[in-house]
Image (cartoon, rainbow, N blue to C red):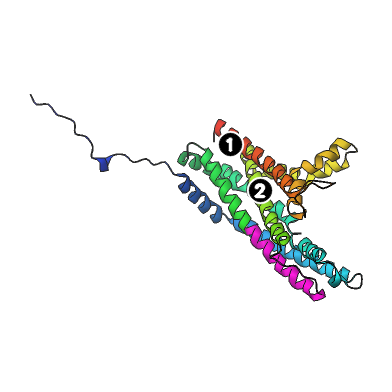
Amino acid sequence: MTTITPTSAHPAQRTHSTSLSFGGVLGSEWIKLRSLRSTIWSYGIVIAISLGMALIMSLSMVSGMNGAMDAASAPAEQQTQFVLQASVFGVYFGQLVAGVLGVLVISGEYTTGMIRSTLTAVPKRLPALAAKAVVLFLATFVVGLIANLAAFVLSSVIFSGIDVAASITDPAVFLSLIGGALYLALVAAFALGVGTMLRSSAGGIAAVLGLILLLPTVLQMIPADWAHDLIPYLFSSAGMSMFTSTTAEPTADGFGVWLNLLIVLGWVGASIAGAAVLLKRRDA
């Protein structure tokens, strides 16, 4: 009677792990983001809004200054503020587009059912959410910075007609342009967290726009000190002050740049943390 001895598998024939590395997850999320039609339209609108608002604001300010004041003889710091005010004006409207895009990046997957494929490929789930946040944040920051730089160039050309100038090498100028782009990126990341928690395009967009636009207005209408005291801590209030404040120190009516940044990061962190908890607990 002969016995059959099992043969061990050759090392080359062993089963290889099919789990994705985080770099692979980042790559897949980048492909999904840039292949979405909504991404192209959203980023195109952000750039168009920045240029359009810079054009309108610059022409309006230049027209108002003609005959009203000698802007050319104004201090350099004041001239810089004129150009910057027009350059970053588009961020006020661009934040709405960034918020909508942040929600759609995740809610679209729930609508189409693609989220099941995503979570099957990344069963731990949290790396998928982190990759989405990183890709969305970086892409929005780059687009926002391009839009702000283009708006600054356009505003500078228009203001040069009345001999008003601002140098992009001035730290106040460059940091304000970066701050505007950073705020847009943080809005998108915040909206991603809200969209993940609500899993609905309509609900997520309504919640994000309500927090950005409606909540500050409601608190301003409440005739109580506590309501007015809360306004500087709101996401949009602190975010706007990130790139419009000229000092890092707290002011009489608000906070400095770094405190405002911490407040915004707190909102974004809470949104992403809530999204992570619910993503792990709920079924796809």
Mark 2: which amino acid? Leu
Label 1: element kind: helix
The residue drawn where x is 72% and y is 67% is 167
Q: Observer-nearest residue: 284 or 139?
A: 139
* Quarter of image, res 170: bottom right
- The span shown in magenta is 143-168
Residue named by callout 2: 186
Q: Which numbered dot is residue 38?
A: none
Callout 1: 10 Å neighbours few (<14), some, many (20+)? some
Callout 2: 10 Å neighbours few (<14), some, many (20+)? many
Q: Is residue 219 visible?
A: yes
Residue 128: in magenta span: no
Residue named by callout 1: 276
The residue drawn where x is 69% and y is 51% is 183
The residue drawn where x is 63% and y is 41% is 193
Q: Which callout, 2 or 1, points at the residue further toward the start of the chain?
A: 2
Which quadrant of the rendered structure holds the C terminus? Answer: top right
Which quadrant of the rendered structure holds the N terminus? Answer: top left
The residue drawn where x is 66% and y is 48% is 186
Q: Is residue 279 above or below residue 82?
A: above
